[in-house]
Image (tube, helix red, strand yellow):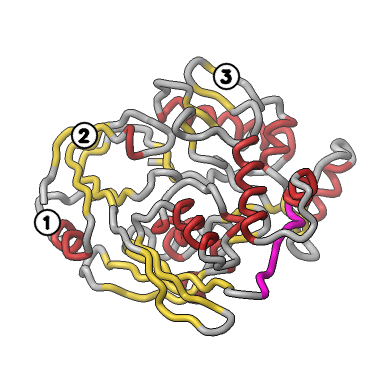
Amino acid sequence: MKIEQNISLKPFNTFGIDATATHFISVSSIDELKEVLALKNYPNKLILGGGSNMLLTKDYDGLVIHINLKGVEKVSEDDDFVYVRASAGENWHEFVIYCINNDFGGIENLSLIPGNVGTAPIQNIGAYGVELKDIFHSCEAMSIETSSIKTFNKQECRFDYRNSIFKQEIKGQFIVTSVTFKLTKRNHQLHVNYGTIASQLEAMQIENPTIQDISKAVIYIRESKLPNPKDIGNSGSFFKNPVVSTQLYNKLLQNFEDMPSYPVSNDEVKIPAGWLIEKAGFKGKRFGDYGIHKNQALVLVNYGNAKGSDILKLSELIQSTIKRLFEISIEAEVNIL
């Protein structure tokens, strides 16, 4: 086990921000993780997974622990369902493709989401009408204080929109080490009515789609709208879609007749943050080495050597503008560090 000094975190975050960690270690086993957590001479520790949902605004003075736990296995199965456990360091999209190739259903709409398995339940990742909670069975997480392993079931995780207990009550107290998914083996429940999946399947001349077809459609849509972090630094959607009162929505409709919405309850609707940002005139704007992507207003990008603080200031400008124009507060989905 080797702790490195003054390591650039640029390869470890999808925004491609060149922040420095004074100390860094990558752990590939539970025992190594326990050993690192037991070190007393590093009071400041940052847990780093796939680096896909974070914005580094400064250097990190402490020990960065990169979670590189690997492994995928079937835990159990019956005629209808299979339970698959994946270690936290597994690449999310590669795990999705593993499931697709084995005809395990329910996960196909979550194709091509950047990041690793371990951060998926923390964020309750979601796309195209499906959220992680829909296929989640349980996860194992290590207590940072005691190094003991606790299993969390779905109810204990308290999943909400891009949220979980790991971002709220017990934030910073546990490290997710593995996630177990409940997936279908037959009678797959297909979700094709969200976004442009149905029209993309039609363009592909597919009338009776399989989970493989839906995955291909989602991949095509995402690649057409979202920049690949390997080409342009980004963390996917930077903001959450805001939920507002029906009363406010109806008021806004008087001035913005084309404002889209999705019902949440009898009293609330969800408004696409991307629409708000585009309507405010930010889509495609560039400020030197950073800006808003030309195809998707939700995505803030690093074109080369931007600082995290620059992107943070841009996000704050967008938030204040949306508040002024629409009386709506939009919240960052990305963790600011």
The label shown at residue 39 is: 1
Count of numbered circles in the view: 3
Pick the quarter of the image with the C terminus: top left
Looking at the rendering, the stretch of residues picked out in magenta corresponds to 187-195
Residue 24 picture quarter: top left
Q: How far apart are the two marked residues, 2 and 3, measured between alpha carbons? A: 29 Å
The label on residue 286 is 3
Residue for point 45% across, 59% down: 122
Which residue lies at the image location 33% right of the left edge and 62% below the top edge? Answer: 71
Q: Is residue 4 left or right of residue 183?
A: left
Please say if 68 is above or below 289: below
Q: Amino acid at mark 2?
A: Ile
| Real-space Cα separation, disc 3 to disc 1, in angstroms | 44 Å
Relative vertical location of residue 9 with respect to residue 286 in this rendering, above or below: below
Residue 318 is at least partly visible in this image: yes
The residue shown at (34%, 55%) is: 89
Task: Verify whether residue 32 appears in magenta.
Answer: no
Local secondary structure at mark 2:
strand
Q: Name the foreground residue: 30 vs 158.
A: 30
The residue that mark 2 highlights is 7
Neighbour tally class for label 1: few under 14, some 14-19, many 20 plus, Cα within 10 Å: few
Mark 1 or 2, nearer chain start:
2
Q: Residue furthest bottom?
A: 78
Mark 2 touches mark 3? (CB < 8 Å)? no
Q: Give SS at disc 1.
A: loop
- Mark 1 to mark 2 CA distance (whole Å): 19 Å
Q: Is residue 309 left or right of residue 263?
A: left
